[in-house]
């Protein structure tokens, strides 16, 4: 049976197009306390991120955290900032532009590609409006979080909903919910590890460190922990690593509550104490290098491991703009665009 391909909804400004909006977390405008304060305020005021009743959280956030953390975080950001800006912004921008180029060279130049940040700039509402102004009446929103979590993915969906709530002629929207077991993602991760090992030899242990969330979110029904474990298992299998040489750990704990365990840094310290000589750490939950990988893992965790007697610590970078990842990302997007695409890709002339 022929595939049903509906006419795009009418746009009154420009010919109707299909678009992809990549979304990542967001980052401060500068590595300064002045820029960190509004960024952290927006981020930590999101009830999807901090699930504590407002009456309790508000005084802590405004009275304590926003007075102390901006300066402390600014120092950390300053240690990873590049001449082009925050690594997270630089990589996300490049991923959008490489994806656009890749789709064009695969005969899909009709697809519009843009990116937005959930916190800070460019905002989801602003970029959705810009895409609509370019005639995008069908938009695939692709949060750059491989594992679904309410604190990341769901809050992107919420923000898209709020932006749509202000539109008269709404575009049609699809979302990528997660891609924790998408073969192209697992294969690109495995290739990045194999390349690292071809150049530096194999470690005693491979640690796959994911961003943590409060442990309570498991009981609340969040599939995040399970999806991280699945990604870790699939990656270890793709690398042919036996379970005793691969570990899944969780980093970036915030606050006093228990978060997902085992915690990355204490695990590294324990491995060093047990006499494990070399560990390689990879952060499969992060699609772009950022503060949490470049500072927390590649600086703080490295120091902690070597400080306890570990011999060698290798940080394996995120997928960033690896061509195999951009190809996988295009495949993921095309799968979800489905019947929005105008049939087979046009051949370049
Ligand atoms: C307060 C609770 C937090 C939850 C829950 C949380 C979940 C979560 N975060 C990411 C990805 C990133 N987080 C980043 C920075 C960051 N995260 C928190 C807090 C929580 N994250 C804070 C306060 C910060 C800011 C920096 C700091 O002051 O420590 C980043 C890096 C951003 C950058 O600019 O480089 C990313 C990416 C995921 C995937 C996740 C849940 C699954
Ligand atoms: Fe975070
Ligand atoms: Fe951190």
Image (cartoon, helix red, strand yellow):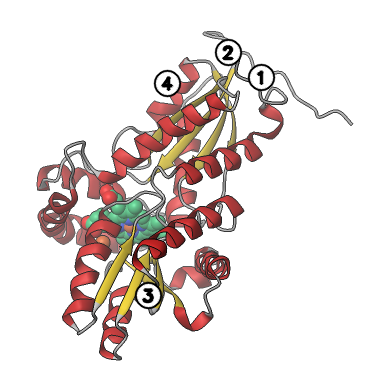
Q: Name the residue that disc number 3 marks.
A: 203
Residue beneath disc 1: 8
Q: Residue at x 59, y 58 (%)?
A: 181
Q: Nearer the viewer, mark 4 or mark 3?
A: 3
Q: Secondary structure at mark 1?
A: loop
Question: Of the residues tagged 3 and 1, which is closer to the observer?
Answer: 3
* Residue under the point 21% across and 62% down: 60
Can you say which quadrant of the picture contains the C terminus?
A: top right
Determine if the C-beta at disc 1 is less than 8 A from ligand 1: no
User: From the viewer's perspective, is 302 left or right of 222?
Assistant: left
- The answer to whether 346 is drawn above or below residue 32 in the figure is above
Query: Image quadrant for the N terminus?
Result: top right
User: Which percent across, then down, holds residue 31?
Assistant: 14, 45
* First along the sequence among labels 2 and 4: 2
- Residue 130, numbered circle: 4
Q: Which is more N-terminal, label 2 or label 3? A: 2
- Alpha-carbon distance for marks 4 and 3? 47 Å
Q: CA distance from mark 3 to mark 1?
A: 52 Å
Q: Are marks 4 and 1 in contact (CB under 8 Å)?
A: no
Q: CA distance from mark 2 to mark 4?
A: 13 Å
Image coordinates of residue 257 in percent, x first then y, are 32, 74
Q: CA distance from mark 1 to mark 2?
A: 8 Å
Under tag 4, what secondary structure?
helix
User: Within the image, what quadrant is residue 90 found in?
Assistant: top left
Label 3, label 2: how many angstroms apart (C-alpha)? 55 Å
- Residue 53 in sight: no
Residue 133 vertical position relative to residue 214 in the rendered view, above or below? above
């Amino acid at each position: 049976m022929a595939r049903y391909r509906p006419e795009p909804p009418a746009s009154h400004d420009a010919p109707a197009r299909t678009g992809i909006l990549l979304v990542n977390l967001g980052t401060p405008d500068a590595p300064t306390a002045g820029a960190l304060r509004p960024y952290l305020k927006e981020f930590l005021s999101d009830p999807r991120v901090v699930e504590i009743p407002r009456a309790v959280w508000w005084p802590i956030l405004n009275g304590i955290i926003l007075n102390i953390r901006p300066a402390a975080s600014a120092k950390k950001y300053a240690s990873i900032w590049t001449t082009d800006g925050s690594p997270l912004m630089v990589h996300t921008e490049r991923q959008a532009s490489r994806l656009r180029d890749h789709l064009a060279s695969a005969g899909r130049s009709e697809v519009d590609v843009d990116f937005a940040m959930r916190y800070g700039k460019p905002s989801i509402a602003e970029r959705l409006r810009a895409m609509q102004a370019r005639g995008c009446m069908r938009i695939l929103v692709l949060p750059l979080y491989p594992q679904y979590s309410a604190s990341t993915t769901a809050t992107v969906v919420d923000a898209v909903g709020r932006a749509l709530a202000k539109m008269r002629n709404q575009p049609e929207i699809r979302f990528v919910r997660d891609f924790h077991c998408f073969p192209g993602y697992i294969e690109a991760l495995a290739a990045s590890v194999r390349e690292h090992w071809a150049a530096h030899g194999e470690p005693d242990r491979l640690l796959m460190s994911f961003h943590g969330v409060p442990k309570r979110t498991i009981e609340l029904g969040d599939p995040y922990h399970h999806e991280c474990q699945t990604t870790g298992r699939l990656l270890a299998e793709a690398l042919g690593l036996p379970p005793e040489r691969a570990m899944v750990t969780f980093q970036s704990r915030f606050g006093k509550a228990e978060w997902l365990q085992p915690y990355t840094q204490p695990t590294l310290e324990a491995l060093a104490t047990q006499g494990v000589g070399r560990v390689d750490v990879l952060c499969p939950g992060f699609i772009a290098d950022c503060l949490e990988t470049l500072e927390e893992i590649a600086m703080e965790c490295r120091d902690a491991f070597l400080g306890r007697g570990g011999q060698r610590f290798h940080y394996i970078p995120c997928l960033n703009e690896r061509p195999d990842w951009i190809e996988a990302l295009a495949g993921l997007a095309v799968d979800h665009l489905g019947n929005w695409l105008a049939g087979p890709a046009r051949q370049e002339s």
